[in-house]
Amino acid sequence: MTDFTPLRSVLYMPSSNERALEKAKAIACDGLILDLEDAVAPDAKPAARESAAAAAASGDYGRRTVTIRVNGIGTEWHDDDIVAAAQAGPAGIVVPKVNSADEVRSLVAAMEKAGAPDHTRLWAMVETPEAIFNVRELAAASDRLAVLVMGTNDLVKELYAEHVPGRAPLLTSLSLALLAARAAGIAILDGVYNDVKNEEGFLAECEQGRQLGFDGKTLIHPGQVGPANEQFAPSEKAVEDARGILEAWEAGKGSGVVTYNNKMVENLHVESAQRTLSIHEAIRALG
């Protein structure tokens, strides 16, 4: 893997709150979503749009991956949001409730018409039953689509489900979206955890998300950043094992059978080890 960008912790920040935007410069998250949608009251949206665009264009957020979440397709603010976000040139434009491949293509066309630079990618939020049914085609609809973002709160609402430990009502949706992202070769972020004071529950959900295969988690509170960073980074043992597998593979070339810790090593193990080390090195490079 080359040019791997860690997205262990991606924090939503309300763009109507100047103090929050300033505070975000010192938060050790991998990414920021400067929000124009749910976190911003209708009468504050135009001013928030200006603030988000200025923040994204400022270069003041260091190595963090800065994105802007616009208002949804069909809302009165959407078109102006897309233009302002595209011209600000963030790493990504996050669009809520993207339901189809056609919508992905329309969004990309709108971004390009507005002058979005090449590095500004589309991040599509998957948060409705329709999106889940269409997610394979949606994920592969454009080379400009870089990330799927799970909108688990909206999914729970749309399914008439409940928020429960273990997230059994959501596992089908989460798994289908993961399959689609991996088939398309793009990143995918897990949804938010609402109970910011329940650290044990949050850690359990991070662990579940990592085990399922998510690249990281979207967050609603700065206090969630540290635990997410730790949970979605390779452990010391995983790094040690990855190095051992690669060393054994190199040493055993031509011998037919390679083992590490009494387990057979094949190409697939080597690829997984290389990915683990790529993630580890990318995280170390963040400082």
Image (cartoon, helix red, strand yellow):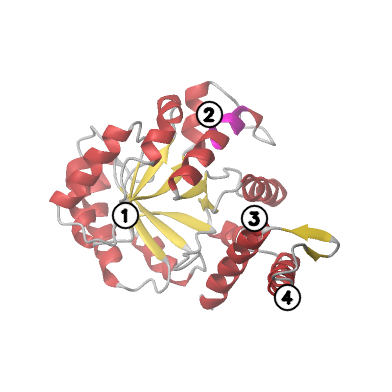
Circle 3 residues within 10 Å: few <14, some 14–19, many ≥20: few
Q: Earlier in the sequence, mark 2 or mark 1?
A: 1
In this picture, which residue range is highlighted in magenta?
169-174
Name the residue carrying label 2. 156
- For image coordinates 63% across by 59% down, the residue present is 272
Q: Nearer the viewer, mark 1 or mark 4?
A: 4
Amino acid on which disc 4 is placed: Ala
Q: CA distance from mark 2 to mark 4?
A: 50 Å
* Most common SS among magenta residues: helix
Dot 3: element = helix
Mark 2 or 4: in front is 4
Residue 163, percent from left and from top:
61, 32
- The residue that mark 1 highlights is 121
Q: Provide the secondary structure element on which disc 1 rests.
A: strand
Question: Which residue corresponds to the image point at 50% horizontal and 37% vertical from the top-left?
Answer: 177
The picture places residue 16, in percent across and down from the top left corner, at 32, 54
- Tell me the distance, in whole angstroms, between the alpha carbons under discs 1 and 3: 30 Å
Judge by depth and name the residue closer to the eye, 107 or 87: 107
Give the residue number, with chain letter if any, for mark 3: 268
Disc sitting over residue 251 in the figure: 4
